[in-house]
Image (cartoon, rainbow, N blue to C red):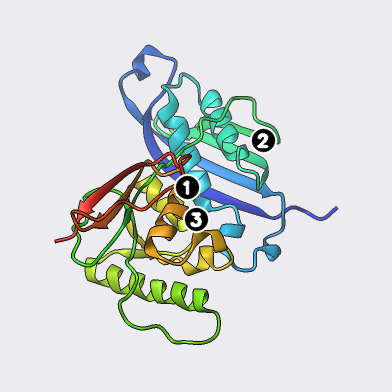
Amino acid sequence: MEQADRIFLRDHVLSADIGAFQSERGLEQRLRFNITVNLRHSVSGSDDHVDHILSYDVLTQAVTTALADQRYNLVETLAEKIAAEVLAHPRAAQVAVTVEKLDRGPGALGVSITRRAARLDATGVTAEPAILVHAAGAPIPAGGLIIVPSAPGLPLPQGGNSRRIALLAMDQAAWALAGALDLEVAETRTELDAAALSGQQVVWAPSRLTADEAAAGQTAETLGIWLATRLQARTLTFALPKDAPLPATDADLPARIDRVLVP
């Protein structure tokens, strides 16, 4: 039987308040995490696309989520929680988790577990990002934000696939806006999720995600609405002149709709 492809996280060290003894309470100690995940599908089928693989961010976020869930008496329970968070991802077939305490003696002490099915409930993380459909001259709010660039004002080439041409022009606008704001460009769902989880500001270049998604449209407004629906955004803000109406959105869109004024 062919061995499954694996991804791993090694020697990831964080500090946390953990331990069953009174002497450990209220004191942070270093923990070392090693995680290996057997994948359901070979990486050879990923087409070199980051959205087609299990991201390494899933492993580091599993540790972060588990530590944020509660204070643990036992590293065994913490390891079970991390395993549950990883196994909640559909591309993970099996996970091995090692958690070691580094400050309780001359060496490391800890536990290693291997699981194909979770024994605790996964908390999961819903990023619920804020999305801004930008326009020239509009202010950029502080904090984590996914920015959809305004459509370029230059005339587009005629002929061929007009929608694909419009999306590529939006990509150019994204790179130009990102350069002006000194921000990174995000093209994939994995990059957008990572930015939302970390509270990072990025500019979205939409063609890679929406080239085959006709429902996403090709204007900044329709693309912003489509992205807010896909990412379950908490807010969707349009940069508009004072008297301009807000674009029509799906009644089921969970995001709060708002505006910022274009000077």
For discs 2 and 3, the disc positioned in front in the rendered view: 3
Residue 46 lies left or right of residue 233; in this view the side is right
What residue lies at 33% left-to-right and 75% top-to-bottom?
A: 152
- Could you give the CA–CA distance between mark 1 and mark 3, rounded to whole angstroms? 16 Å
Question: Which three-letter amino acid code belongs to the residue tagged 3?
Answer: Thr
In this figure, which residue is indicated by the disc labeled 3?
A: 190
Labelled disc at residue 14: none
Question: Which three-letter amino acid code belongs to the residue tagged 2?
Answer: Thr
What residue lies at 42% left-to-right and 48% top-to-bottom?
A: 249
Name the residue nearer the viewer: 250 or 77: 250
Crowding at mark 3 (Cα within 10 Å: few <14, some 14-19, many 20+): some
Labelled disc at residue 114: 2
Residue 55's place in the image compared with 93, above or below, is below
Labelled disc at residue 229: 1
Query: Residue 65, how many percent across, how many down?
Result: 45, 34
For discs 1 and 3, the disc positioned in front in the rendered view: 1
Residue 148 lies left or right of residue 39; in this view the side is left
Query: Mark 2: which secondary structure?
Result: strand
